[in-house]
Image (tube, rainbow, N blue to C red):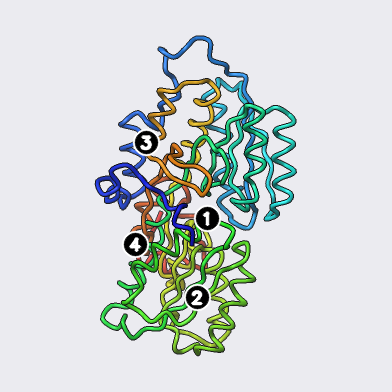
Amino acid sequence: MNPRTTPRTRAASVHRPALLLTAGLSALSLTACGVVGAVGDDASASPSRSYDITVGLLLPDKDTARFEKFDRPLIEDRVSSLTNKQGEVVYANAEGSKDRQSEQFRKMVADEVDVIVVNAVDSGAVAPDVERAKAAGIPVIAYDRLAEGPVDAYVSHDNELVGQVQGRALVNALGENAEDSKVVMVNGAPADPNTALFRKGALGELNGKVDIAKSYDTRKWLPEVAAEHMREAVKEVGAGNIAAVYSANDGMAGAVIEVLQDAGVTDLPPVTGQDADLAAVRRIVSGEQYMTVYKSFLLEATGAADMAVAKVQERSIQFDALARDVVDSPTRKDIPAMLVPVVALTRENIEATVVQDGVYTVGDICTEAYAADCAEIGLTS
């Protein structure tokens, strides 16, 4: 864990409680403050601003369902809206390869895009490409994961809080038996700086309250690697002795649950997740997965698009209004940042989160296989 990557937000002790609000309420409050729409239809803005801009968008993989399903189209739609449909998003997905992402990054620099939004496969490996963009006069906005190098801004969530929410959920689920409970931790990729923050937040809740029997880092967040870790944990700890599993995201949570079921576990222990993937929401409905962390894709993607367009158009007032926080990376201090709220999603608040925010419809979630479980929790169309 590198402590220098820990976000340092201004007045963090004041703002952090607000991060536990539902995403719907958070969206409302941000809009009311003029943040979400700050770059949009501002008649007083400089008449010399350009709408004919090109935004380079680099996403890390296709295994995380949200990137292709939500983040990419949301950013594309927002850039189009902010530029009177004259702006263009040039998109590339690295499919988990840092070398492929570097090639894609260099091509965007060579093609002279106006700004690059990058979710790095490897935060350290991308630094030379960020330097190359800087030398070419192209701003770089780190998206979801904090890239190293001279990035101009960062849009993500309070990732330590994500881990705190996950860890707290497990402790609450275990109740009075928590202290004697064996917990397996399936963390994310070591190359992802968010992994250290998720783990730090989770350990802040778990240490001293549970018995952490095994802890693994998972290469590239791959579910098949998480499954290997879980099979080892089942063999060494015993399937019946695992009281809970900290899984850093939903893709890995699905793999963890399958391994436990294959091992003959019928009364599944609480398993955490993150990203509110549709499959995970369905598992929560059915009781297979205990919770996930819902991070508003709309707010994060919209914020990234707003910051990118404001940066290209040199609209510093709007940019500063969006970047109300600061973070440090190993290579730069005081990076302007937007940290988006998070919420623990459980069976009790599915309707108030992903359904209310329009991420999924009840029909998406409550297919025939889940109809009875949906009816049990009152989730009906």
Q: Earlier in the sequence, mark 3 or mark 4?
A: 3
* Disc 2 from disc 1: Cα separation: 17 Å
Relative placement, left or right, of 95 versus 147 is right
| Distance between mark 3 and mark 1 Cα atoms | 21 Å
Disc marking residue 324: 3
Crowding at dot 1, Cα within 10 Å, few <14 / some 14-19 / many 20+, comes out as: many
- Residue type highlighted by circle 3: Arg
SS at circle 2: strand
Secondary structure at badge 1 equals helix
* Front of the two marks 1 and 4: 1
Pointer 2 or 3: first along the chain:
2
Identity, as a three-letter code, of the amino acid under mark 4: Gly
Specify the label residue 343 is tagged with.
none
On screen, residue 40 above or below 118: above
Q: Position of residue 183 (x, y in %)?
A: 42, 79
Residue that badge 2 annotates: 215
> In the picture shown, does residue 43 fall above or below 115?
above
Say which of marks 3 and 4 sits in front: 3
**Distance between the alpha carbons at the discs numbered 3 and 4:** 39 Å
Q: Are marks 4 and 2 in contact (CB under 8 Å)?
A: no
**Residue highlighted by disc 4:** 378
Q: Which residue is mark 1?
A: 193
Few, some or many C-alpha atoms within 10 Å of disc 2 (few <14, some 14-19, many ≥20)?
A: some
- Of labels 1 and 4, earlier in sequence is 1
Q: CA distance from mark 2 to mark 3?
A: 35 Å
Residue at 33% across / 86% down in the picture?
A: 180
The image shows residue 381 at horizontal and vertical percentages of 41, 53
Whichever of callouts 4 and 2 sits on the residue coming sooner in the sequence is 2
